[in-house]
């Protein structure tokens, strides 16, 4: 390849991707630091009454929109004092999956768009969002069936709210942006270049033959799609997104195939990664045995909801 062709085929698309990624990531971190979900916490009290959940669970649900650590600390304190049973503790932790998802939604969307485009990003993020909504709705339905009705409590009595500071919020957003952007550049640049040359050299033909011989359960996916799954499992989400962006840019995959691959990679890669990242701080809040049970229940429930979303999307397509 000559320099002009290399610039148009690889250099400029990669530079444009990094610029869009930086802008989106900065906006997302500012939105998160400004506690954009604060108004949603007002709905906690009427929602928990539907599922016969205690007021401390509603308070934890509200705090999970801002801080997962604070939300879990509320639950740990109530559980330690005997105000929550173990079943209620598990249900509360599962119920908090929706606000936890909302907490990182801006960053997830603004990171995904530069890699795979608005259409595929909206579909992928929308499906994971619907899975989170379904999880919390299922907890409410289960609680209404198995838990006794409770008298109205006082959700706000359990809440503490720090004074808001623009300077503190923006400083926090910038610190997160620098750390996250550095990490994403480290993954994105080499993977994007690698996949560009994989396409040029026709390496996926050999991968397709190997998959046919060894991984029959993924035969419904193309080799390019399987490679996205492999990068998500081997590294982090941004690695899978970088691979997906390269495949879309080369025309080897369409948006639907990318969404399916990202969902499969999400299901297979997240449990172990979540345990690796969550257990240290969960064990600092709860006892280690309780922390393990919470993580196992959380990840099993999450995987089940994403599998349902995957099957529904594949069937509709």
Image: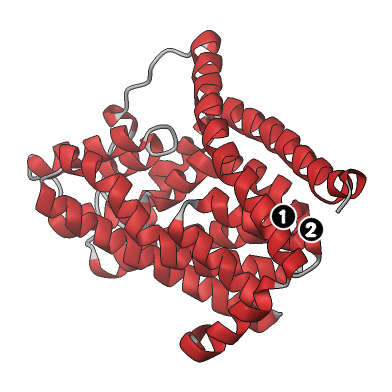
Instruction: Using the image, determine if residue 173 lies above or below residue 273.
Output: above
Tell me which residue sits at (49%, 19%) in the image. Answer: 172
Look at mark 2 in the image and give the residue it sits on: 249
- Expressed as whole percent of the image width and height from the top left, the position of residue 278 reads 29, 46
Tell me which residue sits at (73%, 58%) in the image. Answer: 196
The one of 157 and 9 positioned closer to us in this rendering: 9
The one of 15 and 62 positioned closer to us in this rendering: 15
Please state the total of marks drawn on the protein image. 2
Tell me which residue sits at (47%, 87%) in the image. Answer: 214
- Is residue 218 visible to us here? yes
- Is residue 144 visible to us here? no
Please identify the quadrant where the C terminus is shown: bottom right
Q: Quadrant of residue 199?
A: bottom right
Horizontal relation, residue 201 to residue 272: left or right: right
Alpha-carbon neighbours of circle 2 within 10 Å: few (<14), some, or many (≥20)? some
Gap between marks 1 and 2 measured at Cα: 9 Å
Please identify the quadrant where the N terminus is shown: bottom right
């Amino acid at each position: 390849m000559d320099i002009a062709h290399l610039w148009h085929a690889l250099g400029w698309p990669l530079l444009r991707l990094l610029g869009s990624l930086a802008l989106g990531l900065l906006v997302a971190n500012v939105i998160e630091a400004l506690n954009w979900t604060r108004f949603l916490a007002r709905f906690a009290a009427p929602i928990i009454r539907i599922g016969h959940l205690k007021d401390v669970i509603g308070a934890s649900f509200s705090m999970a929109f801002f801080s997962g650590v604070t939300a879990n600390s509320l639950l740990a304190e109530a559980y330690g004092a005997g105000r929550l049973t173990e079943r209620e503790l598990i249900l509360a932790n599962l119920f908090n999956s929706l606000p936890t998802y909302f907490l990182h939604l801006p960053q997830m969307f603004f990171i995904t768009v530069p890699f795979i485009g608005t259409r595929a990003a909206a579909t992928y993020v929308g499906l994971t969002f619907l899975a989170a909504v379904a999880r919390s709705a299922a907890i409410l339905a289960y609680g209404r069936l198995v838990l006794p009705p409770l008298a109205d409590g006082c959700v706000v009595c359990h809440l503490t709210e720090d004074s808001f500071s623009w300077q503190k919020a923006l400083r926090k957003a910038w610190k997160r942006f620098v750390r996250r952007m550095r990490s994403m550049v480290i993954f994105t640049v080499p993977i994007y270049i690698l996949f560009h040359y994989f396409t040029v050299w026709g390496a996926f033909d050999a991968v397709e033959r190997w998959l046919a011989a060894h991984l029959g359960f993924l035969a419904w996916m193309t080799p390019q799609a399987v490679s996205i799954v492999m990068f998500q499992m081997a590294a982090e989400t941004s690695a899978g997104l970088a691979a997906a962006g390269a495949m879309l840019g080369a025309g080897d995959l369409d948006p639907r195939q990318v969404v399916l691959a990202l969902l499969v990679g999400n299901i297979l890669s997240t449990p172990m990664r979540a345990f690796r990242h969550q257990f240290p701080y969960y064990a600092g809040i709860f006892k280690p045995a309780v922390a393990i049970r919470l993580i196992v229940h959380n990840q099993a429930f999450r995987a089940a909801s994403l599998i349902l979303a995957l099957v529904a999307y594949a069937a509709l397509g």
